[in-house]
């Protein structure tokens, strides 16, 4: 009888594996610790996204506690503006800038977010995110130093406005909040005779503008 021949080993194994040694991992594969770390990061991110979506009202006490656990991560990656996070009804920050010019040229008002901005809807989302970050930084500066003008983001925004508006000599910033109307008030207003729609931008839905500071365009 003929003896069965052993299957030939891969050519690569004859050069990479010595007798009695296990075959080494394939070239290009991650080591075990790296795969474990990447898997942990993915599961952590997915848990943060799910908890953030479930933690908004109406939610249970446990859901809110779990969402609070991931709050530092949401702040770090600026993830609080994702879909459904708006289900929680906080007011919308609004930053109003008054641009001063030389004599003979009237002041100009710039609103962030701009209601009439053109382009894709993602530009509106970006401006909402910028306004929220600026509003938060101003509140932190007011709490820590007692002076909202110490906000680095406010000073940076003023410098940007000076750059993109030639001839501007100074910028005055105010902050307010656009409140979410009570559903009962909206229903009552819509049921009134001759009221075809509810004005979401009525002045009564905005808080009194708070002074942030005045910034000179020469940097002083």
Image: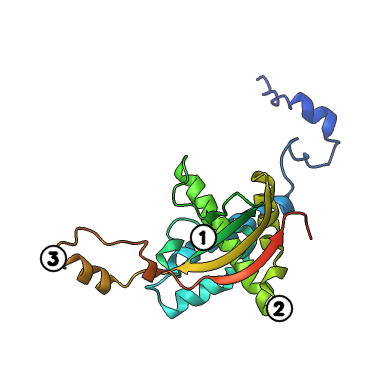
Q: Quadrant of residue 75?
A: bottom right
> In the image as oriented, which residue stretches furthest toward the top?
2
Which SS class for mark 2? helix
Q: On the image, numbered disc 1 is attached to which residue?
A: 49
Q: Position of residue 149 (x, y in %)?
A: 69, 69
Q: Residue at x 69, y 79 (%)?
A: 146
Judge the density around disc 2: few (<14), some (14-19), many (≥20) Cα neighbours within 10 Å. Answer: few
Determine if residue 74 is in view: no
First reached walking from the N terminus: tag 2 or tag 3? 2
Q: Position of residue 205 (x, y in %)?
A: 39, 69
Q: On the image, numbered disc 2 is attached to which residue?
A: 144
- The answer to whether residue 17 is left or right of residue 191 is right
Q: Residue at x 40, y 74 (%)?
A: 59
Determine if residue 56 is in view: yes
Which SS class for mark 1? helix
Closer to the eye: label 1 or 3: 3
Closer to the eye: label 1 or 2: 2
219 and 144: which is toward the camera: 219
Which SS class for mark 3? loop
First reached walking from the N terminus: tag 1 or tag 2? 1
Judge the density around disc 1: few (<14), some (14-19), many (≥20) Cα neighbours within 10 Å. Answer: some
Q: Is 210 placed above or below 194 here?
A: below
78 and 144: which is toward the camera: 144
- The circle drawn on residue 193 is 3
Q: Quadrant of residue 84?
A: bottom left
Question: What kind of colouring is applied to the model shown?
Answer: rainbow
């Amino acid at each position: 009888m003929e003896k069965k021949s052993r299957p030939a080993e891969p050519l690569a194994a004859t050069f990479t594996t010595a007798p009695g040694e296990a075959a080494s991992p394939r070239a290009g594969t991650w080591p075990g610790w790296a795969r474990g770390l990447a898997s942990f990061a993915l599961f952590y991110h997915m848990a943060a996204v799910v908890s953030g979506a479930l933690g908004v009202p109406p939610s249970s006490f446990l859901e809110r506690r779990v969402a609070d656990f991931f709050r530092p991560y949401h702040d770090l990656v600026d993830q609080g503006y994702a879909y459904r996070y708006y289900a929680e009804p906080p007011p919308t920050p609004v930053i109003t800038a008054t641009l001063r010019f030389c004599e003979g040229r009237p002041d100009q008002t710039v609103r962030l977010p701009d209601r009439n901005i053109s382009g894709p809807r993602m530009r509106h989302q970006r401006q909402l995110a910028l306004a929220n970050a600026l509003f938060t930084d101003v509140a932190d500066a007011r709490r820590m130093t007692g002076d909202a003008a110490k906000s680095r983001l406010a000073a940076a925004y003023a410098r940007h406005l000076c750059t993109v508006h030639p001839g501007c000599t100074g910028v005055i910033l105010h902050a307010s909040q656009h409140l979410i109307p009570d559903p009962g008030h909206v229903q009552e207003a819509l049921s009134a005779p001759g009221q075809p729609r509810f004005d979401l931008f009525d002045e009564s839905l905005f808080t009194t503008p708070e002074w942030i500071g005045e910034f000179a365009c020469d940097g002083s």
